Image (cartoon, helix red, strand yellow):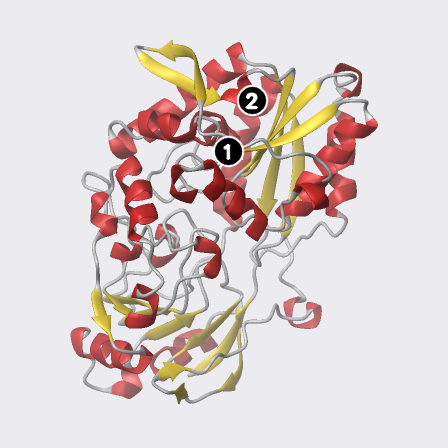
Amino acid sequence: MAKVIQRLYSRRVDDVVGETKRQLERLGIAKRLKGKRIAITAGSRGIARIAEIIKGVVEFVRFSGGEPFLFPAMGSHGGATAQGQVAILRDYGITEEFVGAPILATMEVERIGEVDGIPVYTDKFAANADGILVVNRIKHHTDFTGPHESGLLKMMAVGMGKREGADVAHTFKAWSLRHFIPQLARQVLRQLPVLAGLAVIENGYHEVAHLVALPPDEIERGDREWLRFWKRIRPKIPFNRLDVLCVERMGKNISGTGMDTKVIGRLMITGESEPKHPLPKVVVVLDLTDESHGNAAGLGLADITTKRLMEKVNWHDTHINVFTSGFIERDRIPVVAENDRQALEWALEIAKVRDPEKARIVRIRDTNTLGVLYISQGLWDEAAQNPRLRMVGEETLRFDDGNLVPVGYERPSEAVQKGGRK
């Protein structure tokens, strides 16, 4: 296989803490924080440098004379327990010691209103705070397509609503997510003292590209416009009609569905159109991240997995997460191979690959890591014609006790990226 560097959108914020504070200062809300208890959302996704971003928010509130606290805003994740959600934050480096503020965790909610008969719920601590600062990354959602997907509105509607809020938002599966998230979020904005939203936009290398603070009356518009921006620059697998897509690891810190559905090209939701790219015949996933705490929601997106991944699964937490969403198809168990070698052998057999030299295979670390890929010989000619791709070496697949030997997915140097900035 050849190691290929893909040139992606690469703008990057280096001073994340400083930029976070500068963005919030720009809104002129400091005077409204003095002597007030301010709630700050802390989600369950592996957002780039999220602990530093939260630290910046906390420092801004304290400097303004406020009393900040964090609360887990992650729906039913962490097994739908307060302890489980705090453990997720700890894995991201979000601790009271690092950010400088207490973490108040509960699964209790308050009903703050309703929209067309649909109840709106919010975390108990947040509902009784003097002010709320909403922090989240804006990107596409893995379950549906619409003007608002994963971002600040979703954080208010689903994340802050705990398990009850997530249940409501998923009442009619993808349709309700598309239609309810904006309505539920507007109710939160009307009923609760949301002071600002801080949007995080990542570049193609899973780094912070933009930090944007928005006043309450601009959150909805900003959420919509930055989503459009993300869809223009988001990283993709630069090939189509694959025989095999090999994903080394999946996890909740990578995507809500373990593997980003719009990267692998599989939604698996009844009534929703399937993506037309990259159309893999067979998807293989080899391992589960430690940060997932056994939550393997999305495993059913794969055709083949391994025994080592299955041994890490916490089925209780996985079922709670999947049942809350209602997307039961993604909870199914793929074919389980003894090891990586067997998984790949079976994948080639299922894909009906008769000439290995023509096989169209892509190997990636995870769906957040697309700056470096490994591709089989059947894709080399196509890669050579793509100006955004650069082949930097060849490597034979190597195994250790049946499992693939790790390869490098390090971020390419600035010299290699030159010319890719836009």
Residue 147 position within the rendered picture, expressed as x and y whole percent measured from the top left: 42, 31
Q: Is residue 121 above or below residue 92?
A: above
Name the side, left or right, on which 18 lies relative to 297: right
N-term-proximal mark, 1 vs 2? 1
Q: Residues within 10 Å of mark 1 (few under 14, many from 20)?
A: many
Tag 2's secondary structure?
A: helix
Q: Which residue is mark 2?
A: 126
Residue 94 position within the rendered picture, expressed as x and y whole percent measured from the top left: 62, 45
Amino acid, disc 2: Ala
Residue 98 position within the rendered picture, expressed as x and y whole percent measured from the top left: 71, 46
Q: Residues within 10 Å of mark 2 (few under 14, many from 20)?
A: many
Tag 1's secondary structure?
A: loop
Q: Are the residues tagged 1 and 2 within 8 Å (C-beta)?
A: yes
The quadrant in which residue 201 appears is top right
Which residue is found at the position 53% from the left and 31% from the top? Answer: 152
- Number of numbered labels in the structure image: 2
Residue 338: give its label: none
Regarding residue 139, the answer to whether it shows in the image is no
Amino acid, disc 1: Ala
Name the side, left or right, on which 276 lies relative to 148: left
Which residue is found at the position 70% from the left and 35% from the top? Answer: 101
- CA separation in Å, label 1 and label 2: 10 Å
Q: Which residue is mark 1?
A: 73
Which residue is found at the position 42% from the left and 89% from the top? Answer: 396
Regarding residue 406, the answer to whether it shows in the image is yes
Q: Is residue 378 above or below residue 135?
A: below
For the N terminus, the quadrant is bottom left
* Front residue of 30 and 370: 30
The quadrant in which residue 163 appears is top left
Residue 196 position within the rendered picture, expressed as x and y whole percent measured from the top left: 64, 24
